Amino acid sequence: MALIKSISGIRGTIGGQVGDGLSPLDLVKFSAAFGTWLLRRNKDQKLKVVVGRDARISGEMVDKLVVGTLMGLGIDVVEIGLATTPTTEIAVTGENAQGGIILTASHNPKQWNALKLLNEKGEFLNDEEGKIVLFIADQEDFQFAEVDDLGQLTHVDDYTQKHIDHVLALSLVDVEAIKKANLTVAIDAVNSVGGIVIPQLLKALGVQNVVELYCEPNGQFPHNPEPLPEHLTEIASILKKGKADIGFVVDPDVDRLAIVNEDGSMFGEEYTLVACADYVLANTPGNTVSNLSSTRALRDVTEKHGGNYEASAVGEVNVVTKMKENKAIIGGEGNGGIIYPESHYGRDALVGVALILTHLAKTNKKASELRASYPNYFISKNKIQLTPEIDVDAILVAMKEKYKHEKVNDIDGVKIDFAAEWVHLRKSNTEPIIRIYSESKNELTANQLAEKIILEIKELIK
């Protein structure tokens, strides 16, 4: 069993003892802590919080506990039911709410669930805010409402349609071009809320031919729900047989988008953002942001269009902060997360689908041809297991000193940029490991760079 407390929310496995997994008592405690933080932040106001959830088996149970706790604090709740993470983010501002909670463990397996916490902008809490919520939970410093002051519950069930309408209204989404292209699209929604929204979105975009795979929102994930190549064999097989022009795969809360080419090959999660940015920048020149562990291809494409690329620390809230500083017109993370500020400051697979289909329709290219038009890089992802006596910070300082003649960024661990490749070293927030990501022109050289750095770290450990 596991319970992970972080600034972005609380996630854990369902069942077990209190504090060992995400038990009902833990759900009440952390919901009460978030609600208490909102009450202190908005003194003398009647508060409203939006709650949405993915299709996990535990979702209904978690929802009732969270909603009841918020009402017990005197907070009104707008419950939007089965909804994607970006849909819930949009609903927070749509309802003029003071906050939101998304009940999803994102790409984690079915035994997991989580509370993702949003502020009044529908954006994730920053580091300082998240730590305050965790402190309130630790202190169990809650004041519940008297019976006449309990919160009221409202059900609103049309935010999926509102989200789709919102995407269709984006200036660079061309429904007529998509319709004219007459594409056949395959979709794997891993039996979660993507199975509701993505087929509806495709129909609204003018896609007449949709091959649906695992679009029943019952929470029974048919494969590992993280959209990595090794988990996407079934949709790849459909495309290899020539049954579709492109395949889309989303995670359970639909904030990540992976693409499969018409020949069954992988577009690559790293390149979802690259392709969207290429289309956006070609029509509205500007700047971009991704995190330090994302592909250099985004920088290359941005500079090709005359824009400025900046890297942020890992984590969506850090990407959003850097995007606002850099006035970026598109950004995100290399895990298939597209953040398009014209829509909202959150990763949104619906926006990604609409932009990619418009891009394909207007270029008249196959998906594999579009992918081949971008600089080709390969990322090798490795890790070193740590023991308690290892001083990770000292190791990172030593590596920074060793490579001080290269371009080094230390806002999140240590990233060393070489002329044709890079390596990023960072301490995991959730596991006793050092993550070592390296990128180069091909798999062999990326792995060689990683092996070199791993040996150097092991020497320092000795």
Image: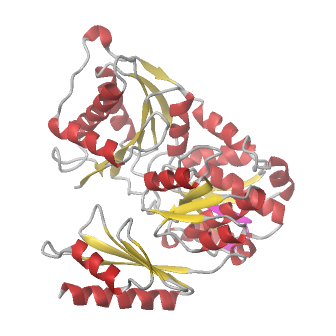
Q: Quadrant of the C terminus?
A: bottom left
Relative to residue 20, is residue 230 drawn left or right?
right
Q: Is residue 247 magenta?
A: yes
Q: Quadrant of the N terminus?
A: bottom left
Location of residue 275 in the rendering, given as x and y in whole percent from the top left corner: 67, 65
Relative to residue 35, is residue 82 drawn left or right?
right
Q: With respect to residue 125, does 440 lie above or below?
A: below
Q: With respect to residue 268, does 88 lie above or below?
A: above
Q: Is residue 191 magenta?
A: no
- Residue nearer the viewer, 364 or 303: 303
Residue 336 visible to an observer of this rendering? no
Q: Which residues are magenta?
A: 240-248
Location of residue 353 in the rendering, given as x and y in whole percent from the top left corner: 66, 55
Q: Please identify the quarter of the rendering in which residue 159 is found.
A: top right
Relative to residue 417, is residue 428 drawn left or right?
left
Location of residue 267 in the rendering, given as x and y in whole percent from the top left corner: 63, 71
- Residue nearer the viewer, 292 or 19: 292
Location of residue 41 in the rendering, given as x and y in whole percent from the top left corner: 34, 29
Q: Residue at the spot x=64%, y=50% of the render?
A: 351
